Image (cartoon, rainbow, N blue to C red):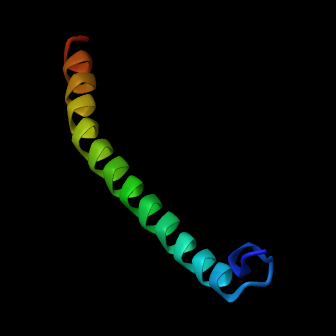
Amino acid sequence: MPPELLPDSPRRERDRGGTAAEYALVASLIAVVIAAAVGTLGTEVLGLFQAAADGFP
């Protein structure tokens, strides 16, 4: 059996750390995209609600 398929393989332990870092990077990028979208859309929605509120007497 190849050593990389064994559960206690040092290579597999190194890969786990790399995978965790990759997931953290992806999660960070998703958070940045969400923050940018909320910032952009938030001002537009605020203007829309303000225009609706100004229409009431």
Number of labels in the image equals 0
Q: Position of residue 25 (x, y in %)?
A: 42, 67
Q: Position of residue 10 (x, y in %)?
A: 68, 88
Residue, far front: 1
Q: Position of residue 24 (x, y in %)?
A: 49, 68
Q: Please name whichever residue, 29 or 51, is drawn nearer the observer in this view of the structure.
A: 29
Q: Position of residue 6 (x, y in %)?
A: 79, 77
Question: As displayed, is residue 47 above or below residue 14?
Answer: above
51 sits left or right of 24 in the view: left
Q: Image point 20% across, 12% down: which residue? A: 55
Q: Please name whichever residue, 9 or 35, is drawn nearer the observer in this view of the structure.
A: 9
Q: Image point 63% across, 84% down: which residue? A: 11
Q: Image point 27% across, 29% down: which residue? A: 45
Query: In the rendered view of the protein, which quadrant contains the C terminus?
Result: top left
Quarter of image, res 16: bottom right
4 sits left or right of 46 in the view: right
Q: Please name whichever residue, 23 or 11, is drawn nearer the observer in this view of the structure.
A: 11
Question: As displayed, is residue 45 above or below residue 16?
Answer: above
Query: In the rendered view of the protein, which quadrant contains the N terminus?
Result: bottom right
Quarter of image, res 52: top left
Q: Please name whichever residue, 57 or 24, is drawn nearer the observer in this view of the structure.
A: 24
Quarter of image, res 20: bottom right
Q: Image point 73% across, 84% down: which residue? A: 9
